[in-house]
Image: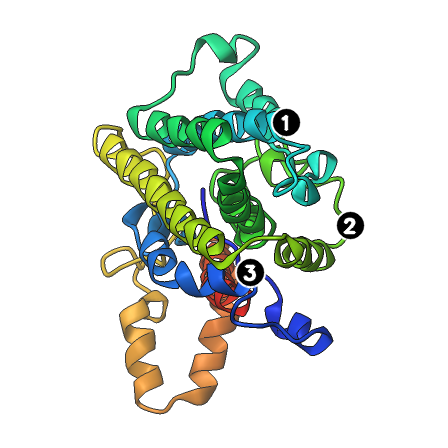
Amino acid sequence: MLLLENGDKGNEDKDCALSPEDLSEMLAAGTKEVHEKAENTQFVKDFLRGRIRKELFKLGAVALYYTYTAMEEEIERNKEHPQFAPLYFPVELHRHEALARDLEYFYGPEWSNRITCSKATQSYVDRIHQVGREDPVLLVAHAYTRYMGDLSGGQVLKKVAQRALKLPPTGEGLEFYQFDGIHSAKAFKQLYRSRMNELELDMETKKKLVEEAVKAFHFNMEVFEELEEIGKTIQEDVLDAGMPVHGAMDGDISKCPYYAAKMAASGGTAYMCQMAMAVLRHPTGQVLFATWFAALAGLAAWYLM
């Protein structure tokens, strides 16, 4: 449920010269390594491949609900704090109400009585409340990590989940990813980064924010790992969206991906094009293409922030 912030930095750089000491630059550089680790957790890799178990997807939404409820409670508490107030965008960004509607879709009208906060999520929630009470400026790191990711890689995750889980095209169950108050994600992310860079912070505070953002990534990874462990106890309810393997070809060897690879390796360019078109006509091939594109978009995006 987390394909973290990537943005459109390349275009932004043409409009304004950023300094290595700008907060947005420090956060991007300081979290690059841990971001790569987060996106290489098995849970995220399976998600991008379209291997999504509905029960795990629902539990992921529960974790997000508790996380965003805590974060937005602390943001409301500190909305006038001078080192956070410029980043207060409740109409545009706040997610806990959208997540509540998603949970009602998945769990029914009594959803609030059917969910509990997991151990890993509770640790994340406790940290958010702690910084909100003791050092509110650190909320900037948590808001940056979550909201910017939702506006970037989160959008491709929405498409993967909608197709793999056969969710309604009208958006039920995926309202978390829908930002009705934002007309241009690119423009808003540029505004948000600009506001971050204009905060009156000394270098020591900026370094603390980078450290806190790294912690936020680790909390997210712990949630992913927890979901992965839970997944081992849940019966598979969504088949792999990958292509068929040997033995499931119905006698047609051209359907076999290994045969296609052999033909491509031997220089069969025309055959490669023919196979590509055949794959895109097949539903599972469409899922593969969508997840492949999502993976490229997600991995490229953060580095362009």
Answer with the quarter of the image where residue 115 lies. top left
Q: Provide the secondary structure element on which disc 3 rests.
A: helix
**Is 113 displayed left or right of 223 in the figure?**
right
Kind of residue at badge 3: Ser
Q: Residues within 10 Å of mark 3 (few under 14, many from 20)?
A: many
Viewer-proximal residue, 262 or 121? Answer: 121
Kind of residue at badge 1: Glu
Viewer-proximal residue, 71 or 41? Answer: 71
Q: Look at mark 3 in the image and give the residue it sits on.
A: 24
- In this figure, which colouring scheme has been used for the structure? rainbow
**Residue 50 visible in image:** no
Q: Residue furthest bottom?
A: 267
Q: Look at mark 2 in the image and give the residue it sits on.
A: 183
Answer with the quarter of the image where residue 40 lies. bottom left
Label 3 or label 2, whichever comes before in sequence order: 3
**Is 135 displayed left or right of 123 in the figure?**
right
Label 3 or label 1, whichever comes before in sequence order: 3
Residues marked 3 and 1 touching at CB (< 8 Å): no
Kind of residue at badge 2: His
Location of the N terminus (image quadrant): top left
Residues marked 2 and 1 touching at CB (< 8 Å): no
Q: Residue at x 61, y 25 (%)?
A: 77
Give the number of the disc on residue 11: none
Mark whose residue sits in front, 3 or 2:
3
Q: Provide the secondary structure element on which disc 2 rests.
A: loop
Label 3 – label 2 distance at C-alpha: 22 Å
Label 2 – label 1 distance at C-alpha: 23 Å
Label 3 – label 1 distance at C-alpha: 23 Å
Q: Look at mark 1 in the image and give the residue it sits on.
A: 76
